[in-house]
Image (spheres, grey):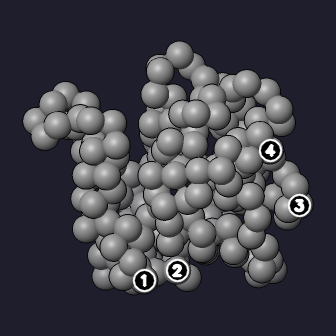
């Protein structure tokens, strides 16, 4: 069974907006280096600071995990097809999540939880998602849908929403909104 058009649109959105930072059509180490710069700039973590180094270390581990899982032709890049195939396998059985996938999920939660209080609120969520070029108002609307009207989303809730993003076929499923977009 192939990936539905709806799920493929979600995967391509994630690929194009959050991973293929230099818009080359494939994900490679350079994309991660650019993402590290973007995240550190967003949070004000200067080069050499502990948070900058921690972000660099985590993101490089995420890249290495992604590359080892998805880069089937070993060319140092992850193509759209490789990306979709990898996430389709995850959707079929989330319990087989690779360490890097869980690391990325936790990285995104921690990035969005700027106050470090264990929950993401609408302001924190919108700031991060809009920094990737998404409309801030759409991000705020996406948060309302994702949180189902609650003031914040906890790490545990985020983990459930995360799994739903990759597997849900229902366009109204709350997990579809975890990356700040309201429609696909």
Is residue 101 rendered to the left or right of residue 180?
A: left
Mark 2 against mark 3, which lies toward the viewer? 3
Label 4's element?
A: helix
Q: Are marks 2 and 3 in contact (CB under 8 Å)?
A: no
Distance, label 1 to label 2, CA atoms, is 8 Å
Q: Which residue bears the numbered disc 3?
A: 170
**Mark positioned earlier in the residue sequence (1 or 4):** 1
Mark 3 against mark 4, which lies toward the viewer? 4
Residue 184 versus residue 155 in the image, above or below: below
**Residue 172's image quarter?**
bottom right
Q: Residue at x 32, y 66 (%)?
A: 31
**Residue 78's image quarter?**
bottom left
Q: Which residue bears the numbered disc 4?
A: 145
Label for residue 25? 1
**Mark positioned earlier in the residue sequence (3 or 4):** 4
**Mark positioned earlier in the residue sequence (4 or 2):** 2
């Amino acid at each position: 069974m192939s990936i539905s058009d709806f799920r493929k649109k979600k995967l391509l959105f994630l690929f194009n907006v959050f991973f293929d930072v230099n818009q080359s059509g494939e994900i490679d180490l350079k994309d991660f280096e650019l993402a590290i710069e973007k995240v550190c700039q967003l949070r004000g973590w200067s080069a050499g600071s502990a948070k900058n180094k921690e972000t660099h270390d985590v993101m490089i581990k995420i890249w290495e995990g992604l590359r080892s899982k998805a880069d089937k032709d070993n060319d140092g890049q992850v193509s759209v097809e490789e990306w979709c195939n990898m996430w389709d396998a995850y959707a079929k059985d989330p319990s087989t999540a690779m360490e890097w996938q869980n690391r990325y999920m936790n990285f995104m939660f921690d990035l969005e939880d700027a106050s470090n209080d264990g929950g993401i609120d609408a302001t924190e969520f919108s700031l991060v998602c809009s920094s990737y070029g998404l409309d801030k108002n759409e991000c705020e609307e996406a948060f309302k849908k994702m949180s189902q009207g609650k003031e914040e989303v906890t790490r545990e809730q985020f983990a459930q929403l995360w799994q739903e993003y990759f597997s849900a076929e229902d366009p109204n499923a709350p997990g579809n909104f975890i990356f700040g977009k309201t429609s696909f």
